[in-house]
Image (cartoon, rainbow, N blue to C red):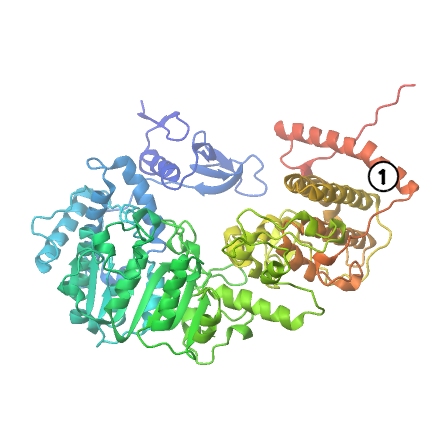
Amino acid sequence: MNNKIIDYISGAKVNATPEEIEAVQPLAQELVEVYGYNKNEIKTHPQFRISLSPSDEKKSYPVDIAVFEDKNLKIICECKKISSQEEETHPRYEELKPRENLKSVFYQIKKNLQKTVIGSTNEPDIAKNVLKILFCKIFDERYQSESGFVNFYANDGNFRESSEKVRIIFAKVKNKFEDVFDKSEEIKMDDKIFIGTALKGEHGQFFTPRNVVRFVINFLDVNETQKIIDPACGTGGFIVESLRYKIAVARKNIFGCDKDSFLAQACKAYMCILGDGSSNIWNEDSLAKFTDNWKEKYEIVVTNPPFGKTIAVEDEKILKNFSFWRKEKDKAIQPQILFLELCLRLLKKNGKLAIVLPEGIFGNESENYRKIREFLLENYNLLAIFNIPQETFEPFTGNKSSILILENKNYDEESKVIFANIQKIGHNKRGDTLYRYNNNGVPLKDEQGNFVVNDELSDILLESKKINLPHYTQTNKENKVFYVLAKEIKETRNLFLIPTYYNGFLKLLSELKANKKEEGFFISIGELIEKNILFTNKNKNIPRGKAVDSHFYLPYQEGLVPFIRTSDIQNLEMTRRPQNGCPPYQQVLSHGFVVDEKGYKMSKSLGNVIDPEELIKKFGVDILRNLANLPPELKSEKDFEKELSLVDYYILLQLEKLTIESQKKYSEYNFNPIFSSLMNFCINDLSSFYFEISKDSLYCDSLNSPRRKQIITTLYYLLAGLLKIISPMLPFLAEEVYQNIPFQFGISNQASVHLVNHFPNFQLSPEKEKELGLITDFFLPLRQDAYQALEKARQKKIITTNLQANLTIYLKEEKE
């Protein structure tokens, strides 16, 4: 009698064959526990069957594992027992291949270890042991044997032997680097590898991604005679990259400090293994202890200090040593401000500082932050400000940051300050690496055959080195890097050091002033205050919570005053033109899929889908909120149909009702019902009803088809009407779309959507109103009955989609 085992997926008893024990069950468990599939998405027993040929209607071939997604077959796994003979697996160094996306790999390892590690559950303790294992790996590759063989590798199935190999390597590490590791130190973890969030974020330390580190070091162009220090070095990201950049520097000129003893030890180990430069790494609190180490001055200071409100420094013994601390006002101060001052002290004359700081220091209007910016501008030569995206430090933190690079030289009003707004950093908010794709959705590879990471850093670096950079007033959407004169920054009221303030707000303001067609086309906030339209308190500030009184608005139907939130102005939202003249969708097809700008179907497998978060960062929040309302391109439509079909009139009549309802709610300052009604119209009337009926003609009919032109005409009026409705709530999106409507069709001759009085009403003749009764009284109830019948057929698995149905309609005889 055969032995039985329990199937991991179904729970059924199955024969304990070699295939089941060695392949099917381990793989099924891995699909659930490592790759995150649900058991109900996987079929093992009874086996799922597939067709081997078109004529195989009975689906006679069984597969060992079938994985489904949304009830559609996604993966087929054919499993075999282990039959290979034992053979030599000792690898050579040249046979090693770099792994892609190590963050994802380590995350899966962490998930496994959380379930299986016995002993200490203290994540930092486990992480410290793992870091020792990683050092063993680096050491083994750097100091490989003369034969070229490496000793850090796993023996399949023999975990004890693999563990012993690592321990032997660690003994070599301790012998070679006695000043880093104590002789008694051990790797106290069985046969496992672990890394997670244990080393990140406890004290505001969010380690800098390596591509950002390389970008900064390359921009500074360190030479071997310069002394370099990182006063908050962590595991040594910046100084290790300096070592890689100019390895001759390492022995005497690279310095680092961190108050976390383990991080300082990790940095020492890393420096030792890579270049024997550990003697200049200290373990002490840079802010609290001013030892002999801090009497030295350095040509290069580079750091990403810990920052955050939760780790503010309150000890007055520390604070009194810093001029940025204002004793009379501040009981505590965030550490990044103190680190900035410390770094400035460490700089030699003509030395350079590169520091990662939260965006508040660059753009917060508070007095303290403004004084810091003023101090920097008056006493140093600012070289560059690189704004980096929010996901730079994600998934560990979402802090928005910038990189400040300056030189310890006197202020020069004619010096050019480089600005760049970096948008692509090479990974998403989950930490997954993002790659570049060609127009066909195929990942790009470099000359060595490695996938090309989708970040802009190398391009930004090359641009920033150019001599003929454009001035911010001369930039266009192609210019990612530009300059602003130091004196121009000092002329601004708040001394902002944010890229979008210059190539966005100030540039737009100058264009408006140059291009205004008549007096009164725009008015500044200051002028509104002077005219007593906006009121200020005794401190000359607009009181919080006070709005422009309703009697200062012109009647709504004239539509001359847009609805603008003060937070939009404060956050420079006004400068974020949602589309920059380039719509996110070149063309939207209504047959259940979307194509990219090259006409290829968008799909995850091709890698050409649009990430909503990328849209928000690039175009602003408006674009995502109402993306469904964007119309198809109208370039080929030169003449609209005057006579529309009944269904066209019906949808326009619904729009008219929505317009009247919205006007009433706006006059009552009751915005929530407007948005709810708008969403209901777009989802139910427009999408589920009108597009369902019209999409075939819109997509399949010829360009000159009368029906297609009727639909385009209707969509054009729908777009115009919806823009007028949303313009008070989403003024920038509405204006951007309005500016891209081809005005030659005569719907409006106003320069702005906010100047439009009202889009055309759709007054129907009595005959048309009677005909529309066919839709409301007959067609819509019939449509509802049909959908109910189709849903019942789907539940009984007679059909899977509506397209498979042959629908027959029966009419009841009316009783006399």
Residue extending furthest toward the top: 816
Q: Amino acid at mark 1?
A: Leu
Mark 1 crowdedness (10 Å alpha carbons): few <14, some 14-19, many ≥20: some
Between 144 and 666, the one lying in front of the other is 666
Tag 1, which secondary structure? helix
Residue 447 image point, x, y percent: 39, 69
Residue 476 image point, x, y percent: 56, 71
Residue extending furthest toward the front: 538
Residue 757 image point, x, y percent: 77, 54
Q: Is residue 188 above or below residue 458?
A: above
Q: Is residue 167 above or below residue 224?
A: above
Residue at the spot 46% in from the left edge and 42% down from the top edge: 76
> Going by the image, does 796 lie left or right of 354?
right
Residue 97 appears in view: no
| Residue at mark 1 | 772
Q: Is residue 167 above or below residue 407?
A: above
> Going by the image, does 630 lie left or right of 497?
right
Residue at the spot 62% in from the left edge and 49% down from the top edge: 626
Between 207 and 488, the one lying in front of the other is 488
Q: Is residue 447 above or below residue 717?
A: below
> Going by the image, does 657 lie left or right of 622?
right
Between 390 and 499, the one lying in front of the other is 499
